[in-house]
Image (spheres, grey):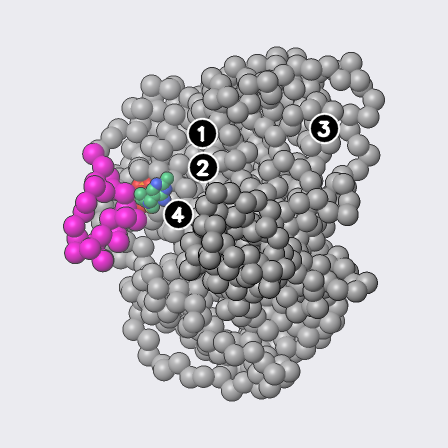
Amino acid sequence: MKPHTLSILVENKAGVLSRVAGLFSRRGFNIESLAVGTSEELSMSRMTIVVIGDDAQIEQVMKQLNKLIDVIKVSDITENETVERELALIKVSAEPGTSRAEVMQIANIFRANIVDVGAKSVVLQVIGDTDKINALETLLRQYGIKELVRTGKIALIRGAKTAKSAK
Amino acid sequence: MKTGAKIVIEGLQREGVETIFGYPGGSVLPIYDELYESSLRHILVRHEQAAAHAADGYSRASGHVGVCLATSGPGACNLVTGIATAYMDSIPIVALTGQVPTTLLGNDAFQESDITGITMPITKHNYLVKNVQDLGRVIMEAFYIARTGRPGPVLVDLPKDVCTTQVDEKSIFPEEVRLRGYQPTIRGHAKQIAKAVQLIEIAECPVIYAGGGVISAEASSELLEIAELAGIPVTTTLLGLGSIPCDHPLNLGMLGMHGTEYANYAVTECDLLIAIGARFDDRVTGKVQTFAPHASIIHIDVDPAEIGKNKKVDVPIVGDAKQILRAMITQLKKRSTAGSWQEKIRTWKQRHPLRYRSDGCLHPQYIIQQLSDLLKGEGVIVSEVGQNQMWTAQYFCFRKPRSWLTSGGLGTMGYGFPASIGAHFARPDEVVFDIAGDGSFQMNIQELGTVAQYRIPVKVAILNNMYLGMVRQWQELFYDRRYSFTELPPLEFVKIAAAYGIDGIKVETCDDVRPALKAAIETDGPFILDFRIEREENVFPMVPAGAAINEMIGGHPKQEEPEIPAAPIRKALSGGSPK
Ligand SMILES: Cc1ncc(C[n+]2csc(CCOP(=O)(O)OP(=O)(O)O)c2C)c(N)n1
């Protein structure tokens, strides 16, 4: 059981997201994260879904996804060299004084940006792979995370190869 | 200029549709208005569920796409069970539903229901048409998707304003269907086919396990050819019955929960299992770990997702069963299986036949045998769900594909009667029998109205035990005979039929069975037979849920110990996968 990253090209049509999401819940597959947006072609969207399962389960997920008429291509890019990114916004308690300075220092180390400063809190924006964001989140917990949102992972295969040309 | 409603009717006609089953309502008024003068035949059912089952029965009996039509909201919702039934058995139907006007969509308007949302998990695909410009293309795609690849139901939801909007006549229907996300594999992989042939050539104790896919692929003659060419015995699933003639020497009958003892033994001991258009359903496999434990498995299926879903296979072949079997036949040399295997199967068949008491009482198995004898494999036999279904599967001698229509995957009580209506319109010159239980028949008994109105000559044989028999059987066997809510009060079905102007006979003795069946067959119109059968008759043999399929209740004591066949075949597989 390990996380697999699926890159899925779908028709850019109403209802596609619910077809895909419905398939996952109906067949008992667990979505770790899901990110969806436009792709290189106007008529297609690309979904990046991280799903946890053993090889047989992942094979079933991919086969079932492929059966959806609006799904054009499903690729498991886990084993490829990929560029993976996720963005998180984290609102942390940071009273002026010691804790704020510490939070800003941590942000610096992680190359996170302070995108909002309030009286008692700051909002950090961080971009990176899943591990980096997890690490930052863990560090910031001690100061008190008031709100957090993550986009879910998006990924592309490195080099000239594309998910479409991958197996 | 043309209205959307007109495009719908034209679209159906372009697809060769002649008969549709439906029920009107507010949001489909524009379509019904077009139907008024159209050459399409519309059969008015008494409940939309029946329209869906009739479309399904039409499809199973003919091999073509069945069509049903219902209004928005309650009408569409009433189709749901019928659509799910077709989905589970991979039956191509197109369901057309009315919808509130696009301007009201999402407003909880009167009789609005999100039928595309509701049917998403039980359709192969569905559409909500918001623009009349898309309508022609959508109708074409719906039929194409329904009948190709692994067939299945497709629903098209039609808002009322889309049906009334006028559109320019040109370019309504595209030249061809193009779907970049849908390209079913038809031709099997050549290497895999060669590997399968190689396995068949070295197998000593092979068995073919044929499912409904053989029938939907119209591959019955290829099935027979390959079985005869290599001398391989054939067992079929509930939906595969009829793909090989029942009285063929290689036929083992049905396998699984209520399969024959010899089919289940053969599968348990075979060294090669060739699954064709079957999906290793739990009612077939019992405990899946002990299903065909010594066998290498070849799995031919048009749906790649079925391969390896429930059971690991050694040689997967994705594609159309007819084409794949053709290719295999051309490569296969005539051979026979091991003499000891043939002998074993002969002995099993002799020692463990299907059986029931013959004590002069009215046993349902006797009725089915008599009907089978009278029809000689002709006609269309439809069943409801429960004991009636299993007795028919066991005791009716099916000789042709598409002669047996039953709800397998969903097990929908109430399927049979409306499906027989559909079957009649597909095969108007043939006798159509619905074998029913008194419980199931009451689930769509209102269709007596339809049958009476159009004088549809379907015959209903009710195996009346005044119980929900199959559930009672489980209560008897596994719940200490605590018959919780499974007894049904006696009912005079003949009198109910009479109220609709339909003839019928009540039958209480063995001697009256044959004459009554004859009377039904010889009557021009519909006919109801109310057989008062042995109330607590059970379906045997039976594999308890979750047990291995060679552990049957009600079977004969097995005399010989199963021996594990030597397996040269295992070695032939490069690094053969463990089971
Ligand atoms: C719509 C539906 N509801 C419930 C069931 C569960 N069920 C399976 S068999 C059965 C009893 C069927 O009784 P009857 O139609 O009288 O047939 P019999 O088994 O007596 O031949 C029931 C209730 C079902 N299959 N379908």
Quadrant assignment for the N terminus of chain B: top right
Q: Are marks 1 and 4 in contact (CB under 8 Å)?
A: no
Separation of marks 3 and 1 at Cα, in angstroms? 26 Å
Q: Look at the image and give the residue range highlighted in magenta.
A: B466-489
Residue B477 highlighted magenta (yes or no): yes
Residue B507 highlighted magenta (yes or no): no
Ligand 1: image quarter:
top left
Q: Position of residue B152 (x, y in %)?
A: 58, 43
Element marked by disc 4: helix
Circle number at residue B78: 1
Question: In this orientation, which residue lies closer to the viewer: A97 or B173?
Answer: A97
10 Å crowding of disc 1: few (<14), some (14-19), many (20+): some
Element marked by disc 3: helix
Circle number at residue B174: none
Q: Are marks 3 and 1 in contact (CB under 8 Å)?
A: no
Circle number at residue B389: 4
Instruction: Pinpoint the chain carrying mark 4.
Output: B
Q: Which badge, 3 or 4, is on the more N-terminal residue?
A: 3
Q: Position of residue B151 (x, y in %)?
A: 61, 46
Nearer mark to the viewer, of 4 and 2: 2
Amino acid marked by disc 2: Thr
Nearer mark to the viewer, of 3 and 1: 3
Residue denoted by label 3: B134
Q: Residue at x 33, y 61 (%)?
A: B545
Instruction: Pinpoint the chain carrying mark 2.
Output: B
Separation of marks 3 and 2 at Cα, in angstroms? 28 Å
Dot 3 and dot 1 within a common chain? yes
Q: Position of residue A24 (x, y in %)?
A: 52, 51
